[in-house]
Every structure is written in structure tokens, then in C-alpha cells.
């Protein structure tokens, strides 16, 4: 019984962290910037594909390929933002939804045409590919990296948004763009940089989450629902809220796999509905 | 008078035109409609069919039984019975195809049964693996396999090799439940015990909890069935990373080590055991001819169960064209197909005259390394197997 409980908690935390890593980029673009970015999964996919390409075809080390893939995704995000997406900030939400879902479909088709429909694997270094003995059970080393990365990202992002000048600018630029501009805040730079960071975080999720959510062209839409649920339950723009939501939902999903797998994902979505009914504005907000 | 003559000429011309339309097909091209997913997430199956079918025709010198053959491809996308039915109706009525081939998904094959029955059009199933399909119309012939066909000998082998307790872990959808039923029924008959039956939801991404349950079940082996692609990769990865092999729980599968996914598992797949009817590493001249013909068609083509299903399917169509001399005669063609036996790239095979399903050897395979590539090395043949699923 105790083993079962600890299994649920450990696997739940590992799965929750993967959910968080995948969703954290969207917390920035959708949550903080209030831009309905349904192409989020596509950015994650691009980051993952870049890492897969570099480690497999170019034989780079994983530790070198990871930052390069993130920078590449950020650059693509910045480019798209500067050329196209910035025109959408002031449009209605429906128009944002339609445009970004169209962008996602375009990127799916492009990926399919360029790389083919098969699953892409990222070559992990031996250090990450082995199981780690926890005493009473083993856990893949890769999961430990995801847990650590999730905690670091949550802490760093929360600190930047709350404590740094850039964070203040970002919040000002989102809440009152006109006022912020008259106060001399370079809002175009802030928006573009934030979007690029959101895209890079999406790429991070794509790379680190690839063990559970394998990279293939339909990746961009397949896991979008999971990501949207995490951001919605966590509360718009609350990074710590997203973390709490991801951990709670991950644990519920894992417990149902141990105890009641015949019910499929029922309990995951039931938990989502209950949490949203209890705290409609986010898990950590009253 | 002149008016009358003109009318007579016109009538004659019309009669001629009508007659021309119904000229025997012998002089014309034989048309074969191939149905499969050529777009969307399953598009690679369409490519496998196309390579297998076209490589077969090329290997026969571009003609089958001296007739020109035209392959007409139609895209069904995913499991989509409604659209498949419409496409097949069009192929039969408008394109006037002589034969049909293809079919990845069971519901698509079920949907066309009334159409082929009514129009007497033979349809060769290259893949769809539910036993009951060939029951639905006498014009179905199948060159793939069924889950019962490969699972029953595997269960018998396990029981003979002192595996007494097994846990089943299958994806919770039609074929998975079929696989679970096949294993349970045969393994119980052999005196074994299924200690736990786990059904994993379709949308599962994290397989770690299921693997922990398998570990805790106290079984000596896990029998599993998962759809190819992401779920399959995810489960095998979780099996390896959580040290199940080290804990002494043997992996028993069927299509899991399919050549399309195989290289992606890496060295972790070494030693995994499956029972299946085709391995690209099957050591025979016929298989080498098949693999070479595929490579000639497309250097990246993969020899696996879907491309060999298409290759053998075209062989059956070839023999039906031969028996009917290229004319459209569904009854005669099917009668010829029922008696067929030949040497396939997978080994000696024949069509069971009663069920019109392929009878073939099933092999026990272990993943091994040949050079830098992983292969399914056949270590034992279970001999010819019928479809054990019919009549259950």
C-alpha cells in the first residue's frame, strides 16, 4: 500500500513536471501576453525536431544541441512575431484563434513534407538514458532532469516577472500598452522578446518532453488540449499556478492509471472540471 | 427517304458505339483500385502499399499475365468507413475496376463488403487484421495476418517453456481487445494463468504506471499489443527504462518490433521476443528478391508486414488475372484464388479455400544486431498456422 502510494506520487510528479515543461511556454504567451497562441505545440515541435536533427543527423552532443535548438526556436518565434503575429495583438480572440490554428496546420503539413510522418527520436547521452535506482524502485534519469528543469524554469520565470525591470515592463505593456509607451517603455521590444522567450520555452518542452510525447508531425495538435488544460487550471499568467496545476493533474492521471485504468482519461478531465469550478480564475487565486 | 436513311445510319452508329462500350476487357488494361491512407498521420502505410504493389508489377516485367495493369490509388485517410464506401462505389461504377486491394483499417474493409458482393469484385486485403472480415463477403481474400493467427502459437510456446504466470497489457481498442482475448483463451487452454489484464487507454503518453503494475503483478512475462508509432515506442521505452527485463519479466509481442519502428528503439530492444509472420531478415531467395525489388523502386522503402502484404496481394491478383484471361469475372477469379499456394517472401503460404485467409508459418523472433542495424532474427518456426480466430 505504501509502495503504491509512493509510486503514484513519484510517477505523478514526474508526469506533472513533463506537463508543466510543455505548458510553461504557453503560460507566457497566452497567460502573460494574453495572446491566444494555438500554434504553441508547433513551436514545441520545432524545438524538438531541431534537437533530433542535431543529435541524430549531425551527431552533436545533447548538451550542445539543446541550447542551440532553443535559440533556433526563439529566433523563429521572434521572426514570426515581428512580421505577422504583432498585427494580431489588437484583434479579437476569435481572429487570433483562427490565425494560429491555421499556422499550426501549415507547420504540420510542412513538417510532414520535409521530415516524413515517422516519429523522430532525440539521441540522449548515456547519462540520461540509464535508469536511476531510488532504493525501492527505479526511475529513468531523463525524468530527474525534467523535474529539475521544471523547478528551475518555474523559479527563474517567477523571479523575472515579479522582480526585474523587464518583468515590470512586460506587465505594463500587456495591461496598458499606450500608457506604457508614453512612459518610454520600448513595448515592441518587450513584446517581441517575450514572445521569443515563450517560443524558446515551448521548444524546451518539446525537447525534454519528447520521451513521453514523441515528436511527429501531428504533435502540434495532439497534445494541445493537455497544455491548454494546464494553463486554464493554473490561472492565466500564473507560472506557479501552472506548476501546481500540472502537478495536481499529473498525480490524478497517474493514480487513475494505477487504480482505474479502464476509465481512460476520465478522472483527468473530471479533476479539471472540479478545479475550474472551485477556482475559476486559477488554482492559486481566490 | 433520305431522312429515313439518315436515321438508320444514326441508329447503326449508336448501336456500334454501345457495342464498343461493352467489348470484352481482354484487349484493355486491367484496373486495380488500391485503398489506403495516403495523407494524414497514417500516410506511411499508403507508401508501404504503393511500394510493395508497384515493386511486384515491376518484378514481373511491368505486366501481369501479359496484361497491362493500371493501379488507381484512393486516399481513405484514417479509419473512415463512410468515405471508403463512397470511394469504392466510384471505383466500381465510374472507373470500372476489375479488382480492389489495400485496406489498413478493419472498419473500412467491413464497409465495402456489400458493394463487392453485389458487383462481384474480388477485393484483396493487404493489412486489416480482424478475423471476421473475410466472413462478410465471399469476394474477400486476405494476404496479411490476424492477431489470433500469431498470438495462439506464441501462447503455446510460452506454456511449453515454463512460463506459467503472464500479465497482459494491451491498448484499449478493437485489435488490442482481440489480442487479449486470443492470449487468454489459448493460454488458459495450455494450463497457464493470466494474473492481471491491463487495458491502457488510447491516449496514454506516460506508460510508467502501467509498467510498475506489470512489475508488481508477479508475472514471468508480459504479453502486449499496441498500435505502431508513438504508443508502441512509449511502452517499449518504459519497459526498458524501468528495468523490467532485469526484473525477469519477459517481453512477448507480435507486431511491436515491426521494421518500420525497429531502428528507433536502439540497443534497448535487443533480445525482445515477438511472434509474427514476416521478418525483413527472413533468409530465403524469394525474400531477397522482394527486398531488392523494393529498394529498386525506392531506396528508402521498408520491407515489413504492410509492404509484403501488398506484394503478395498483387501476386493473388496476378493469378486471378491469369485465370480469367484479363476479363472481369469475379466468381471465376475468386475460385482460382481459393486454390492458390506459392512461395512468399515470408515463406511457403497458401490461401485457405474455406476462409480465403492466408495460411502461413509464424516464427518466433528475437531482436538482434546485424552490422549497425537491428533485425528480427527468426529463431524458431511454429509451422503453418490457420486463422485461429474464425469461429470463436
Image (cartoon, coloured by chain):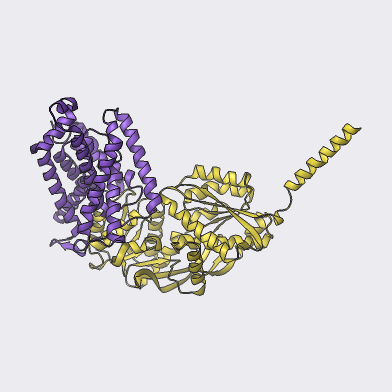
Chain colours: A purple, B yellow
Q: Which residue is drawn at 58% across and 44% down?
A: B89
How far across and down, in percent of the image, does residue B364 sit? Answer: 40, 70
For residue A164, side relative to residue B390 (left or right):
left
Q: Which residue lies furthest to the right in this view?
A: B1
- Residue B134, image quadrant: bottom right
Count of marks overlaid on the render: 0
Q: Residue furthest left?
A: A163
For residue A102, side relative to residue B6 (left or right):
left
- Against B132, residue B254 (above or below) is below
How far across and down, in percent of the image, does residue B321 sit? Answer: 64, 60
Q: Residue at x 77, y 46 (%)?
A: B19
- Against B349, residue A277 (above or below) is above
How far across and down, in percent of the image, does residue B296 sit? Answer: 50, 65
Is residue B352 in view?
Answer: no
Query: Viewer-proximal residue, B295 or B329?
Result: B295
For residue B248, side relative to residue B27 (left or right):
left
- Residue B323, image quadrant: bottom right
Query: Viewer-proximal residue, B154 or A277?
Result: A277
- Against B34, residue A178 (above or below) is above
Q: Which residue is drawn at 21% across and 37% down?
A: A233
Query: Viewer-proximal residue, B155 or A225?
Result: A225
Query: Viewer-proximal residue, B256 or B13?
Result: B13
Q: Residue at x 45, y 55 (%)?
A: B45
How far across and down, in percent of the image, does residue A87 sit? Answer: 29, 31
Is residue A60 in view?
Answer: yes
Quadrant of the image containing the N terminus of chain B: top right
Amino acid at each position: 500500500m505504501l509502495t503504491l502510494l509512493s509510486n503514484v506520487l513519484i510517477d505523478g510528479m514526474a508526469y506533472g513536471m513533463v506537463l508543466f515543461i510543455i505548458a510553461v511556454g504557453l503560460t507566457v504567451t497566452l497567460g502573460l501576453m494574453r495572446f491566444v497562441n494555438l500554434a504553441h505545440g508547433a513551436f514545441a515541435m520545432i524545438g524538438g525536431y531541431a534537437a533530433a536533427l542535431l543529435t541524430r543527423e549531425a551527431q552533436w552532443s545533447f548538451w550542445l544541441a539543446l541550447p542551440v535548438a532553443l535559440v533556433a526556436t526563439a529566433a523563429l518565434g521572434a521572426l514570426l512575431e515581428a512580421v505577422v503575429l504583432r498585427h494580431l495583438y489588437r484583434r479579437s480572440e476569435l481572429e487570433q484563434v483562427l490565425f494560429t490554428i491555421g499556422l499550426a496546420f501549415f507547420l504540420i503539413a510542412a513538417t510532414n513534407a520535409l521530415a516524413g510522418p515517422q516519429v523522430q527520436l532525440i539521441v540522449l547521452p548515456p547519462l540520461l538514458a540509464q535508469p536511476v535506482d531510488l532504493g525501492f524502485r527505479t526511475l529513468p534519469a531523463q525524468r530527474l532532469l525534467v523535474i529539475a528543469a521544471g523547478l528551475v524554469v518555474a523559479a527563474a520565470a517567477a523571479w523575472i516577472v515579479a522582480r526585474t525591470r523587464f518583468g515590470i515592463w512586460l506587465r505594463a505593456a500587456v495591461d496598458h500598452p499606450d500608457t506604457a509607451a508614453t512612459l518610454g517603455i520600448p513595448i515592441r521590444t518587450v513584446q517581441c522578446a517575450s514572445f521569443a522567450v515563450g517560443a524558446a520555452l515551448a521548444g524546451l518542452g518539446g525537447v525534454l518532453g519528447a520521451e513521453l510525447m514523441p515528436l511527429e508531425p501531428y504533435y502540434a495538435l495532439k497534445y494541445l488540449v493537455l497544455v491548454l488544460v494546464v494553463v486554464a487550471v493554473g490561472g492565466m499568467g500564473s507560472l506557479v499556478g501552472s506548476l501546481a496545476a500540472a502537478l495536481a493533474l499529473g498525480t490524478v492521471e497517474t493514480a487513475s492509471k494505477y487504480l482505474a485504468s479502464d476509465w481512460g482519461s476520465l478522472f483527468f478531465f473530471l479533476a479539471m472540471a472540479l478545479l475550474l469550478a472551485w477556482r475559476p480564475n486559477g488554482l492559486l487565486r481566490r | 427517304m433520305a431522312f429515313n436513311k439518315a436515321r438508320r445510319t444514326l441508329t447503326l452508329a449508336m448501336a456500334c458505339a454501345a457495342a464498343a462500350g461493352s467489348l470484352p476487357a481482354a484487349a484493355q488494361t486491367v484496373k486495380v483500385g488500391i485503398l489506403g491512407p495516403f495523407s494524414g498521420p497514417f500516410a506511411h502505410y499508403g507508401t508501404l502499399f504503393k511500394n510493395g504493389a508497384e515493386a511486384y508489377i515491376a518484378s514481373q516485367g511491368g505486366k501481369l499475365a501479359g496484361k497491362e495493369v493500371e493501379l488507381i490509388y484512393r486516399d481513405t485517410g484514417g479509419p473512415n468507413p463512410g468515405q471508403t464506401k463512397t470511394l469504392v462505389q466510384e471505383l466500381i461504377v465510374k472507373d470500372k475496376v476489375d479488382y480492389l486491394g489495400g485496406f489498413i483499417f478493419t472498419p473500412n474493409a467491413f464497409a465495402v463488403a456489400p458493394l463487392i458482393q453485389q458487383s462481384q469484385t474480388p477485393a484483396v486485403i493487404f493489412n486489416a487484421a480482424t478475423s471476421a472480415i473475410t466472413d462478410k463477403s465471399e469476394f474477400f481474400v486476405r494476404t496479411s495476418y490476424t492477431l489470433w493467427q500469431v498470438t495462439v502459437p506464441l501462447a503455446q510456446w510460452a506454456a511449453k517453456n515454463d512460463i506459467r504466470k503472464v500479465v497482459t497489457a494491451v491498448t484499449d481498442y478493437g485489435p488490442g481487445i482481440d489480442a487479449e482475448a486470443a492470449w487468454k483463451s489459448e493460454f488458459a487452454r495450455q494450463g497457464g494463468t493470466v494474473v492481471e489484464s491491463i487495458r491502457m487507454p488510447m491516449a496514454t503518453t506516460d506508460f510508467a504506471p502501467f509498467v510498475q503494475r506489470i512489475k508488481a503483478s508477479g508475472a514471468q512475462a508480459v504479453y502486449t499489443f499496441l498500435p505502431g508509432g508513438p504508443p508502441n515506442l512509449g511502452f517499449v521505452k518504459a519497459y526498458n527504462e524501468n528495468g523490467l527485463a532485469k526484473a525477469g519479466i519477459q517481453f512477448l509481442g507480435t507486431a511491436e518490433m515491426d521494421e518500420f519502428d525497429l531502428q528507433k528503439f536502439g540497443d534497448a530492444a535487443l533480445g525482445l521476443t515477438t511472434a509474427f509472420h514476416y521478418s525483413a531478415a527472413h533468409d530465403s531467395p524469394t525474400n531477397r528478391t522482394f527486398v531488392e525489388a523494393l529498394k529498386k523502386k525506392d531506396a528508402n522503402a521498408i520491407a515489413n508486414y504492410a509492404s509484403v502484404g501488398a506484394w503478395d496481394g498483387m501476386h493473388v491478383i496476378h493469378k486471378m488475372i491469369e485465370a480469367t484471361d484479363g476479363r472481369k469475372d469475379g466468381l471465376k477469379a475468386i475460385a482460382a484464388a481459393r486454390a492458390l499456394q506459392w512461395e512468399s517472401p515470408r515463406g511457403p503460404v497458401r490461401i485457405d479455400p474455406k476462409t480465403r485467409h492466408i495460411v502461413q508459418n509464424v516464427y518466433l523472433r528475437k531482436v538482434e544486431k546485424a552490422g549497425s542495424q537491428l533485425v528480427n532474427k527468426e529463431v524458431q518456426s511454429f509451422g503453418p498456422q490457420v486463422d485461429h480466430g474464425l469461429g470463436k
